[in-house]
Amino acid sequence: MSVVVSHVSADNITVAKFGGTSVADYQAMLRCADIIKKNSTNRLVVVSASAGVTNHLVRLSQADVSQSEREQIITNIADIQFAITKNFTNQENINNVILALLASLRCFADEQAKQHTTKNSDEILSFGEQLSSHIFAQVLQTVGVNGHYFDVRQVMKTDDLYGKAQVDLAQLAANAITLLLPLLNEQVIVTQGFIGSDQQGNTTTLGRGGSDYSAALLAEAIEASNLSIWTDVVGIFTTDPRITDQARSINEISFGEAAEMATFGAKILHPATLIPAMRQDIPVFVGSSKEPDAGGTRIQRQVDSNPTYRSIALRREQTLVTVKSPEMLHASGFLAKVFTVLAKHQLSVDLITTSEISVALTFDNPHGSTQALLTKAVVEELEQLCEVSVEHGLSLIAVIGNKIHGTKGVGSSIFDKVNDFNIRMICHGASNHNLCFLVPEADANQVVERLHDTLFSS
């Protein structure tokens, strides 16, 4: 089979990122390969681990895994990957690569069982992306695209904060220009999301949302013209379509709106993904690898439409903390003391409202529930300063749009429709792009559905 080689200019490169479901099996990978083949600007491909593999690796990285369970997990991972390569005409080379990677994985798993470290955990977690990128490069070759594997750890240099490593942006840019960019004129490069390496060459991981973030960082480093995020849904929706079947895909959205949506619970993009794209002003496309011709959402700095209401985001498992003290009245320094306690326990405040003698706030936890953040030690330390009340079982609803804080009638349009629900906290005015409030978890879906019907019915 002939191999396609397309020459592109440095300012006409698209970075394409495929999530775990997009590279879950052979047919899924073929769809992705077709996307790459149809657009010659797709030069750099970033892949996640095949769906299901990361869950196995997470378990394998834990401390209490017996030898028999370790072997079973590695067998399960092998089954997922060999189910893809069995469709190749020439399997020997890629299967040998997989076997070698699994042998290395077994060594790290055995070492982890003897001495559990976060460094070993990162090594173990990296194998999902290593496997899928090797395999997808071979899939590209089978459809006539000159695809080649590239180890992202050569360019994605980080600190040694294993599990949530911070990328050295200057070193990434220098490495990418020297080692990566020259390859893109002759090849389609397939590399890994989520992983990097520290200055000693040890593997690191970038944490939750790391694959999308990796793709955005690489796009920024090579000054790509576009970033495409291929997932299993047709773009970003006006709200979660699992809540209401009236949710619809959004054709275009600004960076500011998309950042608010990601921050307040939309699952399609991790908030960090947009930061490199915004710095370099790189448009981001979000589409479905299952339905690549069905359109999607384009995210960029300037958009043609700027509606008051763009979407409704929902973030569950929120905790509301209210601190109250008469000492706050006409006194200075009280809030500083409260925030000193929170900073000591590394708690990041998400939303805050104040009155004369009380402050209500929520905490930011990108990994899910905020309940676990508020430990007994935090509460006891706050109680030395003031009266503290804690409410769990809440959901945060954010109405995202444009000029929300300066548009007449926004409050009545939203709250008149939900006045029969208990609203626990309202934050409005701090952002041009959102109005958000807390409701009991049990009411959240109904509130979102009613608001969506009201704000997006036309």
Image (spheres, rainbow, N blue to C red):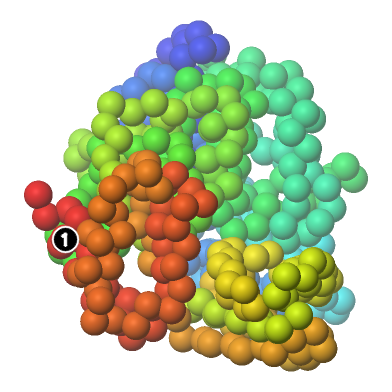
Residue at (65% x, 57% y) in the render: 207
| Residue 18: quarter of image | top left
Residue at (67% x, 38% y) in the render: 152
Toward the viewer: 131 or 334?
A: 334
- The residue pinned by badge 1 equals 454
- The vertical placement of 275 against 328, above or below, is above
| Residue 390: quarter of image | bottom right
Q: Residue furthest right?
A: 200
**Residue 233 in sight here:** no
Residue at (73% x, 61% y) in the render: 163
**Residue 248 in sight here:** yes
Residue at (26% x, 32% y) in the render: 305
| Percent coordinates x, y for residue 109 in the rendering | 74, 71
- The vertical placement of 427 against 253, above or below, is below
| Residue 75: quarter of image | bottom right
Toward the viewer: 45 or 84?
A: 45
Left or right placement of residue 429 versus residue 387 in this view: left
- The vertical placement of 417 against 390, above or below, is above
Toward the viewer: 385 or 11?
A: 385
Dot 1 amino acid type: Thr
| Percent coordinates x, y for residue 64 in the rendering | 72, 86
| Percent coordinates x, y for residue 382 in the rendering | 77, 84
The quadrant of the picture occupied by the N terminus is: top left
| Percent coordinates x, y for residue 405 in the rendering | 40, 48
Q: Residue furthest front?
A: 330
